[in-house]
Image (cartoon, rainbow, N blue to C red):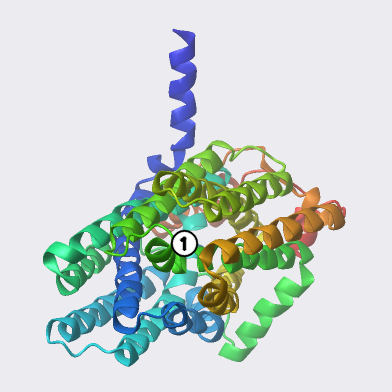
């Protein structure tokens, strides 16, 4: 009787954030939105390969998606801090639906070319660059403070669950119904996301009411990051993982065709789904480890897991092993990113969170720096050799960082207390006159134990 009760409590703790109604509505819309996004990823890369039959051209399609993350995302962070995040999500997701409709019509009428696909991909990347910072900054507002890592992990887990469902659906439906009708499905996903976001609360979703210019707001974000070395380090670390992980995902269709000898979209879809399975497992592990304080060591082990499985994936031409190894690499990646994002969110003040998250979103902008050289290498030497070298470089980077940077190696974050209310719950009670501002500050606060091996305290960071 004791063991089942322990397991029941453990499962309950793992999914604790689902007790918050506001977070559940957010998670529903988030899942629908990323289902549409993931399906469009596989559709775009499939179309690029069909139109060009070139690995380099296929990888170049990451440019119009990723470049907006370097140029537009900082503005998205400013907007997320200045305006209501709920409204911003509704507007940007509506724009994604419009782009999806235009893409669908072009495919149906036979007008699609690689150039048009390039432009439409840029439009999607620009929209997501405005959407992403607000989406990330919402999570700490919807759950009590002590459940932050749990909520971040479940959010990332839901996104990776879409990587199981969406690629499998997209890859398997391309042959029987055609690319155009699969784009129709993505449009309905975006519409469902819009409906879900209307159920989010309207109070407490504006980070800063300070009146200043856009440039000055961006400078304020830079100054905060520069003055908090731990966040700066974690932002750089968060850019490293996509630099190595995303090229592998982008070249899956090429690898499936040339190494696994499966070019009709099924292997690509199932491998993308394998990545999603690994991501969900990694997210569940991360949610379970939400009370584990040594975040630096957790990131170190997670990074090594990712690199080891990428190496194994590169060295096999058996589909079953490829499926398992690709899933394993995503377990490590997800545990790393969930831990990384939790510390960044916990140490960022509410009025600055949109801008800080815009820098985490900029990690997508460094993807072409890894994808394009690997596209050249894959054309020249093949994907197995390319992925092997990439995994060895990743191991070297992780080990050297752990050994040479004490701030990373000894990073600790632990919530010792429990907050009674989430930020939005407190703001709603304040708006109804049922709670004072001082009472809300007490009820939304959880004691934080933070250490980065430099004697920097939470109080010092808030200064």
Residue 90 visible (yes or no) = no
Q: Quadrant of the C terminus?
A: bottom right
Residue at 35% from the left image edge and 47% from the top image edge:
21
Residue position marked by numbered label 1 in the rendering: 138
Residue at 46% from the left image edge and 77% from the top image edge:
59
Instruction: Tell me the crowding category of disc 1: few under 14, some 14 to 19, or many 20 or more residues within 10 angstroms, Cα based.
Output: many
Residue 381 visible (yes or no) = yes
- Toward the viewer: 376 or 117? 376
Residue 34 against residue 12 in the figure, above or below: below
Q: Quadrant of the N terminus?
A: top left
Q: Splitting the image into 4 quarters, where does residue 262 fall?
A: bottom left
Residue 224 spot, x, y in % from top left: 71, 73
Residue 30 against residue 97 in the figure, above or below: above
Residue 306 spot, x, y in % from top left: 59, 51
User: In the image, 257: left or right of 384?
Assistant: left
Residue at 50% from the left image edge and 71% from the top image edge:
133
- Toward the viewer: 409 or 121? 121
Residue at 74% from the left image edge and 64% from the top image edge:
233
Residue 439 spot, x, y in % from top left: 56, 49
Residue 307 spot, x, y in % from top left: 63, 53
User: In the image, 80: left or right of 238?
Assistant: left
């Amino acid at each position: 009787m004791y063991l089942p009760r322990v397991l029941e409590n453990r499962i309950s703790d793992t999914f604790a954030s689902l007790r918050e109604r506001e977070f559940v509505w957010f998670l529903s819309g988030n899942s629908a939105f990323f289902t549409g996004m993931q399906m469009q990823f596989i559709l775009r890369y499939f179309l690029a390969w069909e139109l060009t039959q070139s690995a380099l051209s296929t990888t170049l399609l990451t440019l119009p998606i990723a470049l907006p993350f370097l140029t537009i995302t900082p503005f998205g962070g400013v907007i997320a801090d200045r305006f209501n995040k709920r409204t911003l999500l509704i507007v940007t997701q509506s724009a994604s639906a419009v782009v999806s409709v235009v893409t669908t019509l072009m495919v149906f009428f036979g007008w699609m070319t690689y150039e048009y696909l390039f432009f439409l991909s840029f439009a999607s990347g620009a929209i997501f660059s405005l959407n992403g910072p607000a989406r990330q900054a919402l999570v700490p507002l919807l759950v009590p403070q002590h459940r932050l890592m749990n909520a971040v992990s479940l959010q990332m887990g839901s996104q990776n669950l879409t990587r199981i469902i969406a690629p499998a659906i997209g890859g398997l439906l391309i042959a029987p119904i055609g690319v155009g009708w699969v784009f129709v499905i993505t449009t309905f996903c975006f519409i469902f996301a819009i409906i879900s976001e209307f159920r989010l609360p309207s109070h407490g979703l504006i980070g800063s009411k300070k009146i200043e210019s856009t440039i000055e707001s961006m400078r304020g974000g830079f100054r905060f990051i520069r003055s908090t070395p731990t966040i700066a380090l974690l932002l750089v670390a968060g850019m490293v993982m996509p630099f190595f992980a995303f090229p592998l995902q982008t070249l899956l269709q090429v690898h499936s065709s040339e190494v696994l000898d499966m070019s009709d979209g099924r292997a690509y879809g199932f491998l993308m789904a394998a990545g999603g399975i690994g991501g969900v497992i990694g997210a569940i592990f991360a949610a379970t480890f939400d009370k584990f304080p040594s975040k630096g060591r957790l990131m170190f082990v997670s990074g090594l897991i990712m690199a080891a499985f990428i190496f194994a994936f590169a060295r096999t031409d058996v589909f079953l092993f490829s499926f398992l190894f690709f899933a394993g690499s995503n377990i490590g990646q997800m545990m790393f990113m969930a831990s990384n994002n939790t510390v960044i969110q916990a140490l960022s003040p509410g009025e600055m969170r949109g801008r800080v998250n815009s820098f985490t979103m900029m990690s997508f902008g460094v993807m072409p720096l890894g994808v394009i050289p690997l596209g050249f290498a894959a054309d020249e030497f093949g994907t197995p050799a390319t992925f092997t070298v990439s995994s060895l470089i990743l191991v070297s980077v992780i080990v050297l960082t752990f050994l040479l940077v004490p701030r990373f190696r000894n990073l600790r974050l632990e919530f010792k207390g429990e907050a009674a209310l989430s930020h939005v719950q407190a703001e709603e009670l304040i708006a109804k006159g049922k709670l004072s501002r001082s009472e809300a500050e007490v009820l939304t606060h959880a004691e934080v134990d933070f250490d980065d091996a430099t004697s920097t305290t939470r109080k010092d960071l808030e200064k």
